Image: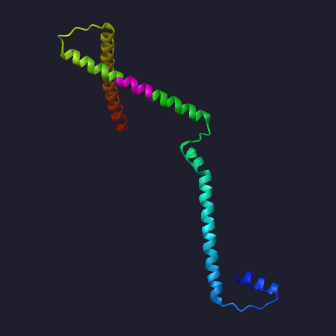
Amino acid sequence: ARVYAMNKAASFGETLHIDCQVYGYLEDALQVRLRNFISRVLICATRRTGSQQNAFEKSTTVFEPKQRIRQVNVDAERSKNERFEKERQALLRFGETIVVKRKRVFDNSRLEDKVAKVRQEEEERIRADVANKAARNALGERIHSR
């Protein structure tokens, strides 16, 4: 601001006597004006790109298509297993209520077959868990004895 005022005065061929405090006020006013201008530019820029920011935040870019396919397959397998487990638990609960209430006779033989199959799978799962635990314990003792 000071250099600009001196150049303007020199261009008119006049000598100006300006107090130093005036230059300080001019510099402060110029800084405030520039800050306001920059803040307005930022506000306009965010308004202009505001809708784009929300759209880009939600999307994730995957560089490897194989990774995306693998993730989709894993999610599908997980949901399939969850559905199967829920159905199995429901059939087990239904089978338990039938065992408790022996007075009722199965009307639906297909449902009876499903309950029997789920019970058999549950027994096989329990046997496999017991066998695996025994094998792990035997291997664990063998590994630790070496």
Seen in the image, is 70 located left or right of residue 5? left
Which of the image's four quarters has the N terminus? bottom right
Residue 37, percent across and down?
63, 67
Instruction: Give above or below for 83 relative to 34.
Output: above
> Which quadrant of the structure image shows residue 145?
top left
> Which quadrant of the structure image shows residue 29?
bottom right
Q: Which residues are magenta?
A: 79-86
Instruction: Give above or below for 122 relative to 58.
Output: above
Residue found 48% across the figure and 28% down from its top: 76
Residue 144, percent across and down?
35, 38
Seen in the image, is 107 located left or right of residue 83? left
Instruction: Give above or below for 23 relative to 36.
Output: below
Tell me if residue 38 is in the magenta stretch. no
**Number of labelled discs?**
0
Question: Visible in this render: residue 125?
Answer: no
Which of the image's four quarters has the C terminus? top left
Residue found 60% across the figure and 47% down from its top: 52
> Which quadrant of the structure image shows residue 83?
top left
Q: Main secondary structure of the magenta part?
A: helix
Residue 26, percent across and down?
65, 81
Seen in the image, is 10 located left or right of residue 31? right
Instruction: Give above or below for 106 relative to 85.
Output: above
Tell me if residue 82 is in the magenta stretch. yes
Residue found 22% across the figure and 18% down from its top: 97
Residue found 25% across the figure and 8% down from its top: 106
The residue closer to the viewer here, 59 or 133, is 59
Residue 48, percent across and down?
62, 52
